[in-house]
Amino acid sequence: MLNDEYYEEITSNEADFIIDLYEAIDALVHFNIPVTLVRLAHELGIKAEELSDYLPTILLILNKAEQEREIQ
């Protein structure tokens, strides 16, 4: 049986990090602060280089947060 959908298992630490990432991006969008890797790294207390693996996730969250703000 082939499944067209791909699911990647993540650890609880990764899930917590993605939630923190979402909250940081949502807050920046809410206050009209530009969302950059440097700013996100500052908000999360990590190095900007550590965010490179999360670029697709960051863009997805950013697009969703901006859409939510437009609706409100």
Image (tube, rainbow, N blue to C red):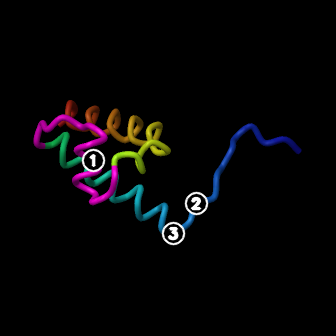
**Number of residue marks:** 3
Spot the residue most to the right: 1
Q: CA distance from mark 3 to mark 1?
A: 20 Å
Query: Looking at numbered disc 2 in the image, what kind of residue is underneath it?
Result: Ile
Q: Nearer the viewer, residue 72 or 36?
A: 36
Give SS at disc 2.
Answer: loop
Relative to residue 29, is residue 6 drawn left or right?
Answer: right
Q: Nearer the viewer, mark 1 or mark 2?
A: 1
Please tell me the numbered disc located at residue 66.
Answer: none
User: For mark 2, does the 10 Å Cα neighbourhood hold few (<14), some (14 to 19), or many (20 or more) residues?
Assistant: few
> In the image, which residues are magenta?
31-47
Q: Is residue 42 magenta?
A: yes
Question: The N terminus appears in which quarter of the rendering?
Answer: top right
Which residue does the numbered mark 1 point to in the structure image?
40
Q: Residue at x 34, y 37 (%)?
A: 64
Which residue does the numbered mark 2 point to in the structure image?
10
Horizontal and vertical percent position of residue 44: 28, 57
Which residue does the numbered mark 3 point to in the structure image?
12
Relative to residue 21, is residue 15 drawn left or right?
Answer: right
Please say if the residues under marks 3 and 1 sit with CB atoms less than 8 Å apart. no
Q: Residue at x 32, y 37 (%)?
A: 62
Query: Looking at numbered disc 3 in the image, what kind of residue is underneath it?
Result: Ser
